Amino acid sequence: MIYYVITFANTHSAIMTQSHLETYANICIMPTLREISAGCGISIHFLPDEYHNVMTGLNTHGLDAKMYTLYKISEDDGKISPTPLS
């Protein structure tokens, strides 16, 4: 299984980004994965078919890339492997 997670430096950035992205894509809030130690503890989760919509939402609202980190998550037999993309 492959999906994406966006982590944030602080809770304010996570909530603000969530409100912007909800108009562009099907996203959900989740706790940050243990395998990703950075961030405030709140992440946004979305599936690969929403990638373009999420990126459009991030770019349209001019959200500062310093506010977040995007990860591609591969999950196989319960092993989670995050790859940072930004």
Image: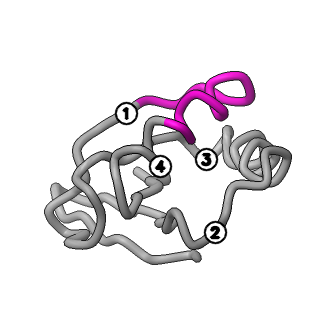
Residue 48 marker: 3
Q: Amino acid at mark 3?
A: Pro
Classify mark 3: residues with Cα within 10 Å, few (<14), some (14-19) or many (20+).
few
User: Sequence order check: which comes first, mark 1 or mark 3?
Assistant: 1
| Magenta stretch in the rendered image | 16-28
Q: Are marks 4 and 3 in contact (CB under 8 Å)?
A: no
Q: Which residue position is annotated with label 2?
A: 65
| Mark 2 vs 4, N-terminal side | 4
Is residue 12 a member of the stretch shown in magenta?
no
Q: Which mark is residue 29?
A: 1
Q: Is residue 29 above or below residue 31?
A: above
Badge 1, how many Cα within 10 Å: few under 14, some, many 20+?
Answer: some
Looking at the image, tell me whether mark 1 or mark 4 is earlier in sequence order.
Answer: 4
Instruction: Between residue 82 and residue 22, name the one nearer to us.
Output: 22
Residue at 51% x, 40% y: name it. 46
Residue at 61% across, 47% down: 48
Disc nearest the viewer among 3 and 2: 2
Q: Amino acid at mark 2?
A: Ala
